[in-house]
Image (cartoon, rainbow, N blue to C red):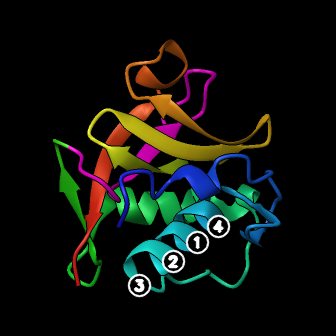
Amino acid sequence: MTTAWWAPYVGIPFLDGGRDRLGADCWGLVRLVYAQEIGIALPSYGEIGASDLLRIARTMRDGSAEDCWRAVTVPATFDVVLMRDGRGGRSVVHVGVMIDPRRLLHVEPKTDALIVPVAHTYVRGRVAGFRRYVA
């Protein structure tokens, strides 16, 4: 792993239901990073689109005995960040992947994939928690 493992993902365009470098939604970007950087094949959830990811985000948020995602308070590289929408809603509707404890990689309909500090005003109030994949 190089120090800038995340660089090839910056600029991937948003594509609802996208799962590759030609275009990805937020879950597609997380899946792509996990597969290519750490060799973990996350489920695609039936190639669902971004509008259906709310159910998946809730599963990650709530956790279960069968769930492979554990809540962490201090994020590390490759942890998933759960986010609410930007309009003050309480539901988790978006995910990104941490590139280090202070910055995340994500993609939304308004932007191509980009790096944003967790403390950025656009992100800070949206973060609902962090999850680490445990096999």
Instruction: Determine the CA span between mark 3 and mark 2.
Output: 6 Å
Q: Nearer the viewer, mark 4 or mark 2?
A: 2
Q: Earlier in the sequence, mark 3 or mark 4?
A: 4
Quarter of the image with the C terminus is bottom left
Which residue is label 3 attached to? 39
Query: Farthest residue in the top direction?
Result: 121
The residue type indicated by label 1 comes to Leu
Tell whether 75 sits left or right of 40.
left
Is there a contact, CB below 8 Å, between mark 4 and mark 2? no
Q: Earlier in the sequence, mark 1 or mark 3?
A: 1
Which residue is label 1 attached to? 32
Q: Is residue 82 above or below residue 32?
A: above
Q: Nearer the viewer, mark 1 or mark 2?
A: 2
Residue 43 position, x and y percent, is 53, 84
Magenta region: which residues?
75-90
The residue type indicated by label 3 comes to Gly
Residue that appears at 73% across and 80% down: 47
